[in-house]
Amino acid sequence: MSGKVKVILSMLIFGTLSIFVRQIPMATTQIAFYRGALGSIFLVVTLLLKKERIPFQLIRKNGKFLLLSGFAVGANWILLFEAYRYTTVSNATISYYFQPVILTMLAPLVFKEALTIKKISFVLLGMFGMVFIIGFSGSSAGYDHPIGIGFGLAAALFYAIAIISNKKVTGLNDLHLTAMTLIIATVILLPYVLLTTGLGTSQLAVPSILSLLVLGVVHTGIAYVLVFSGLQKIEGQTFAVLSYIDPLTAVVVSTVILQEPISGLQLFGGALVLAATFMNEFFTGKVPKTEQVE
């Protein structure tokens, strides 16, 4: 299987995430915990099958950044799943894809990078797009769009924090880094889940259990293995282009499969956000390969 095919498959998988989250009648903290636990098991088994040595010395060396990344990823999942409950999948996903714009705004503080006129223009374009999405969503039957979009933006912020933390990690390859991040997120979520909602598996029917397994094994374990093995074989800009299959798939899922409403002005706002992200990646320097996965 070529690198492009692996990345395309992974993005299609990420784009259908919401279908299965919507089928699991659990608290978002519980869903995030099981996603992390199942994904961690799958990635650890993958590493063992590939006979890759786990670099414990490097893990200890990067401990504080791995802890921050794991915490941020766990919070990111919880907030994204909450966004799915309050707004449409289209709104939640596009809000989540505001992450590169947030990272650009944080870069001068964290990485001491200059905030150029070009970067500022892309940030403003993304903000302008969010105004269209929020301003023309309002509240409708079964939704509270401003709250849902707020959760999506908060998820994007925590994903930006995870990206910043991961950039500080040295010596670990992408698969080791992802496995450790998921393990740490799961360990952090476990006591919170036990003290608040409990594990909650006894209340699940068979279809919900199957959705949870698909979320953990397919949308986390298999998807991450595909994306990280695929990106090793393609250029960063190619990956950046293919990564937009994820939000486009999510919009199709939202409007066609879930039959969720979306207006032309909201679509226009979403297009502006994605355009700002795309131009920020392509016209402000070297394109990173692993910045946006769900």
Image (cartoon, grey):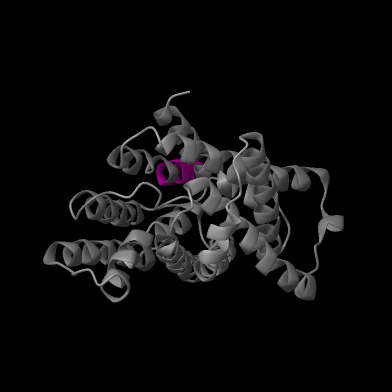
Residue farthest left in this picture? 117
- Magenta range: 247-255
Q: Quadrant of residue 190?
A: bottom right
**Residue drawn at 79 percent across, 70 percent down:** 194
Residue 41: x percent and y percent?
A: 70, 47
Residue farthest right in this picture? 202
Please state which of residues 293 and 91 is positioned toward the viewer in this rendering.
293
Please state which of residues 172 and 268 is positioned toward the viewer in this rendering.
172
Residue farthest top in this picture? 1
Residue 96: x percent and y percent?
A: 43, 59
Q: Is residue 264 above or below residue 100?
A: above
**Residue drawn at 52 percent across, 70 percent down:** 68
How many numbered discs sit on the rendered protein?
A: 0
Position of 101 with respect to 290 (left or right) is left
**In magenta segment, residue 253:** yes
**Residue drawn at 66 percent across, 39 percent down:** 48
Position of 123 with respect to 20 (left or right) is left
Position of 194 with respect to 41 (left or right) is right
**In magenta segment, residue 166:** no
Position of 76 with respect to 27 (left or right) is left
Residue 43: x percent and y percent?
A: 63, 44
Residue 32: x percent and y percent?
A: 65, 59
Residue 98 in view of the camera: no
Residue 155 in view of the camera: yes
**Prevailing secondary structure of the magenta residues:** helix
Please state which of residues 156 and 269 is positioned toward the viewer in this rendering.
156
**Residue drawn at 55 percent across, 39 percent down:** 225
